[in-house]
Amino acid sequence: MRSIGRLAMALTLAVWALPASAQQKPNDKIQARLSEKVASNPGSAEANRDLGVWYYKANRFAESRVPLEMARKINPRDGVSALYAGLAAEQMKDYAAAKDAYNSYLAVGKTPSVRRDIRGRLVVVTTEEAKASAKAAVSNESKIAQVAGTPTTVAVLPFAINSANPDYAPLQVGLSDLVISDLAKVKRLTLVERDKIQAISDEIALVKSGQVDATSAVRAGKLIQAGTIVKGSLLNTEGQNFTLTSLTVSTQTSQQVGSGLNETKTMDQLFAAEKDLVAATFKDLGITPTPAEQREVDRRPTQSLQALLAYSRGLMAQDAGRLDEAARFFDNARSIDPGFSAALQRAQSTSAQQQGTTAKIESSIKASSEGASTNAAVTGNSNNAPLNNTLNTVIGDVNPTTTNAVATTNTTSAAPPTTRPAAAEATGTDQPAPRTGEVTIVIRKP
Amino acid sequence: MRQRILPIVLLAGLAAPLAAQDPSNTAIILDPQYVSYKLGTGSAARTITQLGVPFAVIVPFSDRFNIDISSSYANSQVKVPGTATSTITGLTDSQVRGNFTLGDNAAVITLGVNLPTGQYKVPDGQQAAAGQIGNDFLIYPVTSMGNGLAATGGLGFAWPIGDWNLGIGASFRYSTAFDAYQVQTSVLRFTPGNESRVRVGLDRPIGDGSFNVSVTYSKFGKDQADSTTFATGDRALAQAALAVPVGTNSDILLSAWDLYRGSGQQLGAPSPWENVGNAGIALGWRAGDVYIQPNIEERIWNVDGNKAGLLTNVGLRLRFDWIGLSMNPSATYSIGSLYTIGQPATDVTGFKASLLIRLH
């Protein structure tokens, strides 16, 4: 009994003593071994991938990209290469390459949890890409401004909100989001994503005290290479009445196109007013939606002002990087109007964005069978025989269960029996030949 | 003392994984299989069939700790001309196993329990079906409908030695008594002997392929059938496989295994040693998103130095992904003979179809 206690205590201490990050760190000997493998077999996708993953784990991101891209080229269906190529590109702030690699993983990757995390990561990368693009646009403004976008490339700027009620302030992004969504339903138009507009807006401080001046609006439009900008405002001086106005402006001429919208309604008619604004914009652009497009445009994502306000607060929080808060607002919008699908999508993408950290992605891939190869970059052994595979086989042999039987079925027509059918063997009833078997039961005397 | 220590050990085992648990990577495997062997020809032919549905759930709580739960449903039949068909149907025993990795894939502690959820007190009419599925030569997906409550604890270690990985493991299985058979109102109480098992193996990459070889040896204590004790013989299983890529899109798999059971005693009769050897070759290639692998295997059975069976298996395995599931359909046709000293050979033909489905 005492020995059992000592054994249990030792086991307890051993388990607690294990650091959570008790990982074998990449070392130069392994790098040399992996490099040799690449040198001796440059056409091996696995060798290139292992080396690339090693460099990534050693935080040598620039060096990791060459073998990882080579591995992707040799074997475009290898998800692990695409994943690490994306992670490395992201670390190097090459967001376009990161998006390309992540999208490749979504196409060929096999681990559902990693795919889910990647979707969230793509949201982050897209936002970062928009910010980087905005910075680059501002620093190259003189060149970019020379290249005008086509008139059908439309940017809807954040709305100017003039209201004594601060609850309406988030409508600056909520209304523009609704308008972008409606305009995008017409195939002839190319809408600039709200992420890009927001990034430029932040970069040049477009909205000042809730206002967007005309010069800044045109400047923003040019920077994002939109041919047309839509600039809206909502004036709510008292009570429920408001005036919604819009201007459609050509960035090439800086002149207003068409007559825009100027109508006064009450807050319970906000969604109808937004549809009027969209219709006025189509008229300004000289576009007539097809009947099918018009039906889509007429569809209202929600009828609830409160749901829209919650959704708008979520967008503002998301733009500010406050993801917890954003998720709560989107959930709130969904609970107010369960049919508000845009809120559901935003809630899901925000949740994925929260989950999809690069560390989480690495952890998920490592735990998966697909990611067993990443261990090769740490141990230096090829992905075909990493230690964890060895251990799995050992455990399957010393403590076999049905799990092992089904896991090996597809490599042989019949896996060898790893356990004995004790009763059948003992009684000899396991024989297939037409023999006569007899079971003798000895009954103890009472 | 034991009552106090056990919760501590369990807590210790759970504490580390809680920090990084990710059960979202849970794997679910379902492997329905249909197997049918026909022994003999004409009106005297006997047919043994089984529809087995093994299933397993593997939950990786963290990088270090996973649990798998597995069981099977099976319907087995032995049809002998002129006699009533022996049929046994139902759930088999279930296994719950936890594996805890120590260090960086250096060692694993494994603990498992065999839960007696299967079929017990097997009556007269079901005994042939319950027994014959356990044959080591004509292999069935479900080999036993019940082995009684048992617990297994073991350790596995792995070390890289140059380009090789050495894997060593040992385990001990403690078995308890169960009611195996029922004849009229009498029940056979059976206690399997405890099992000590050791395993040594090596594996290594070969180019972009791999090679592995291992030997597992099991030593059994004495079985007890009611008041009678005996030992059926220790077992040794050797396995080897070589997978080699051919070109950029195909590969060859050579595999072999050999199961040896030492001589011993059955209930009321000697149990001679026997050996089953199996060797196969498979050629695989990818056609679009489908991996295709025709294969052929030869199996030979020897009992006490005498040839007892020969079987050729020709099959086709496929592998592809479908709506997020890994699909592995396969079909095998078998032809061969069973041999008994002093009697003419018995022809054997068989067919097996399976569809292994794996989520994650």
Image: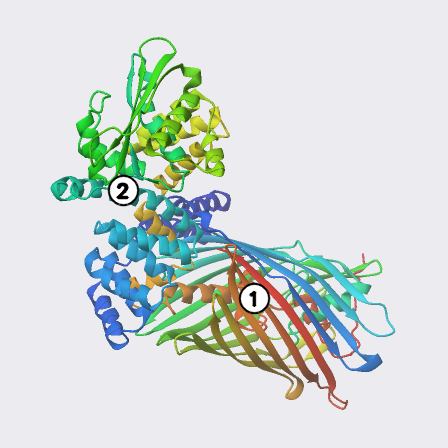
The crowding category of the residue bearing disc 2, from other C-alpha atoms within 10 Å (few below 14, some 14 to 19, many at least 20), is some
Q: Residue at x 69, y 76 (%)?
A: B350
Q: Which mark is residue A150?
A: 2
Residue B199 visible in this rendered orientation of the protein: yes
- Residue B159 position within the rendered picture, expressed as x and y whole percent measured from the top left: 35, 68
The crowding category of the residue bearing disc 1, from other C-alpha atoms within 10 Å (few below 14, some 14 to 19, many at least 20), is some
Element under label 1? strand
Q: Left or right: where does residue A352 sit relative to residue B152?
A: left
Q: CA distance from mark 1 to mark 2?
A: 79 Å
- Residue B272 position within the rendered picture, expressed as x and y whole percent measured from the top left: 66, 81
Q: Amino acid at mark 1?
A: Glu
Q: Is residue B304 above or below residue A39?
A: below
Q: Which mark is residue A206?
A: none
Q: Seen from this angle, which residue lies furthest right?
A: B82
Element under label 2? loop
- Residue A179 position within the rendered picture, expressed as x and y whole percent measured from the top left: 37, 30
Residue B137 visible in this rendered orientation of the protein: no
